Image: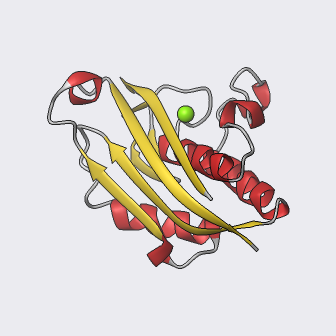
């Protein structure tokens, strides 16, 4: 089963940027109801999609005060438990983070390990790509970040 996920957040000065549970910046990051971890949100949607379980908004509504400032890696862990309960296991996850700045090169491996550890998977099953949008559009103007994810699940 293949799943696809996409998440986007506005970027603002004075906000934190957290990706895959890794703190990237303390003073230029995502505006969000939760901690704004767009990578975690994108992976959650891909996993839910592959398992036929709807979307992140149904499971963790941003209108619910329970999720205000939520650690999105905990939401990802809840999602992993859910797909496990539904009889699925992960084959692989492949994500593309689109962000003009800061550059993620030095953080990519740490993010990968963090996601792999949470999923209890070998790092070879997790791939994290990062790129700019060549200064075009809202990503190129550093107004926002977008993350795309595909994943594959199989029945246990
Ligand atoms: Mg989000």
Quadrant location of the C terminus in the rendered image = bottom right
Question: Relative to 17, is 51 on the left or the right?
Answer: right
Q: Residue 2: image x %, image y %?
A: 57, 56
Q: Residue 114: image x %, image y %?
A: 52, 65
Along the line of sight, which residue is nearer the eye, 96 or 68? Answer: 96
Question: Relative to 23, is 136 on the left or the right?
Answer: left
Q: Residue furthest front?
A: 1
Residue 91 seen in the figure: yes
Residue at 72% x, 47% y is 52
Residue at 39% x, 60% y is 128
Q: Count numbered badges in the picture.
A: 0
Along the line of sight, which residue is nearer the eye, 14 or 36? Answer: 36
Position of residue 70 relative to residue 151, above or below, is: above
Quadrant location of the N terminus in the rendered image = bottom right
Q: Residue 80: image x %, image y %?
A: 71, 59
Instruction: Determine the quadrant in which ligand 1 lies.
Output: top right
Along the line of sight, which residue is nearer the eye, 23 or 72? Answer: 72
Q: Residue 131: image x %, image y %?
A: 25, 47
Residue 27 seen in the figure: no
Question: Relative to 60, is 22 on the left or the right?
Answer: left
Q: Please say which color scheme the image uses.
A: secondary structure
Q: Residue furthest left?
A: 134
């Amino acid at each position: 089963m293949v799943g696809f996920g996409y998440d986007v957040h506005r970027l603002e000065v004075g906000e934190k940027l957290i990706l895959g549970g890794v703190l990237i910046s303390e003073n230029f990051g995502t505006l969000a109801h939760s901690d704004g971890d767009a990578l975690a949100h994108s992976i959650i949607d891909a996993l839910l999609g592959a398992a036929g379980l709807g979307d992140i908004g149904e499971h963790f509504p941003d209108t619910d005060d329970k999720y205000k400032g939520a650690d999105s890696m905990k939401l990802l862990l809840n999602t992993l438990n859910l797909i496990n309960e539904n009889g699925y296991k992960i084959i692989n996850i492949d994500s593309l983070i689109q962000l003009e700045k800061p550059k993620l090169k030095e953080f990519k491996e740490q993010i990968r390990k963090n996601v792999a550890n949470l999923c209890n998977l070998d790092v070879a099953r997790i791939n994290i790509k990062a790129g700019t949008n060549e200064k075009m559009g809202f990503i190129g103007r550093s107004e926002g970040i977008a993350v795309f994810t595909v994943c594959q699940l199989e029945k246990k």
